[in-house]
Image (tube, rainbow, N blue to C red):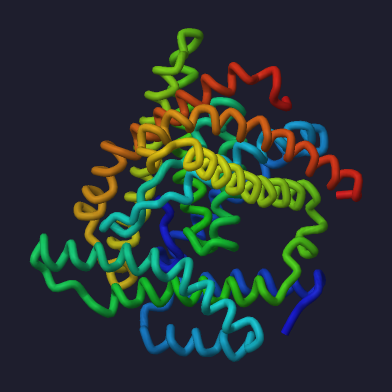
Amino acid sequence: MTFGPRGARVVLPCWLFACFGFSAITDLRVLLGCLLGVALLFPRQAPRAARRALLTAVPFTLAIVLLTWAHARFLLHVRPDFHAYAGLVLRAALIAFATFAVLGAVDLLGALAPWPTLSRLLVVTLAQIHALRLVVRDSWLGLLSRLPRRPSARDGLRNAGGVTATLLTLSARNARDITDALRSRGF
Amino acid sequence: MHIPDGFLAPTITLPAYAAAAPLWVWAVRKHFGPSQVEALPAVGTLTAVAFVLQTIMIPVPGGTSTHLVGATLLALLRGPLVAFVCESLVLLVQALFFGAGGITVLGVNALAMGLAGPLAAWLLWRAFGRRASRAEAFVAAYVGLQVSTAVVVLALAAQNHLRPAQFPTPWPVMAAAMFLPSLTVAGIAEGLYTALALGLLLRLRDRLPP
């Protein structure tokens, strides 16, 4: 199931309401049922959405929950409620799964078209994030190639000032180019 | 510091959205209207830097994580409302594309990390007046991060009080687990980042867009 910009403007509020609904469920069986329901509603997007949720939202939430559980169990010597902790992970997984499935089915930028400033800011930010990640990776590889040994934290810190200056100058130029390009295309 | 999706029930997240929504509208109208189009590249850049800073998260046992925020720098340079919008955008991008934080808790996270902390830092910075330098920027950012942490702790504590089945960690455990790294590591790192980047940006001011 995929939706164009008009369909997306209907689907996105429904997804938002559903997410709030999911966030109030504490029964594990109902949560599992909702997971199944979302998978049945978006069969084409489900495998990719599940993989993304398992790689992003789930590990982090699981780490937090396990740390909290271990803290309560071994430091405070109390027996934590398994259902409550499992519910935290399942709710996070369900909402992430539904989000990725819906985003895979809708044209988000098309749906945002009536709000050009928001679209522009979102595009500029996403492009900048990509550019920044590339610059950080390139500068780290550059530092690796310049040193005969593996760079220490001190080397990294010493390099960080120059990298930040280059990064900000470059990304400011990139952002201006992207904004000009968007404006010339009528955004 | 992001509260993940599902940790807070709509009894807290909906009022947070209701409080944040008018502020979003006001801030966007005031600072991101057609007349301020020239400022978008610089704001986009600082937003992206804040995003990159927030990708390094350390989970803590209290129910969330600790990390740099980067919004204080935006607040000192462009004002707390710009910081609020930019931080909200960072949180939205993280929730939609990277599975960090969440869409239902966006209002709470934005109010904590985008408004309360940066606003406290900005007020402190203003209180320092003309004498404000790197050391004052450090103090402002440090205090700002602690204020953000306090708001997150408050939201989670309220959830535990209202419905323990939804969030079972008691507030003293959570407060200790969150404030310890925030006071000892994240606050200092945020202060250093803000002080150094502010100094650098003020030196580069002529080469950057308005």
Q: Residue at x 36, y 71 (%)?
A: A88
Query: So how many labels did they put on this image?
Result: 0
In the rendered image, the vertical position of residue A166 relative to residue B4, given as above or below: above
- The percent coordinates of residue B178 (x first, y second) are 28, 48
Judged left or right of residue B161, residue A2 is right
In the rendered structure, the answer to whether residue A132 lies left or right of residue B152 reads right
> Image point 38% across, 45% down: which residue?
B151
Q: Residue at x 50, y 73 (%)?
A: A53
The residue located at (43%, 62%) in the rendering is: B4
Left or right of residue A163, residue B127 in this image = left
- Residue A59 coordinates in the image, percent (x, y): 39, 68
Can residue B30 be spotted in the picture?
A: no
- Residue B202, above or below B61: above
Q: Nearer the viewer, residue A165 or B134?
A: A165
User: Looking at the picture, does residue B38 appear above or below residue B114?
Assistant: above
Task: Provide residue B47's location: percent of width, then percent of height.
Answer: 60, 41
- Could you tell me if residue B28 is visible in this image? yes
Quadrant of the rendered image containing residue B207: top right
Q: In the rendering, at what x and y percent does residue B39 appear?
A: 73, 32
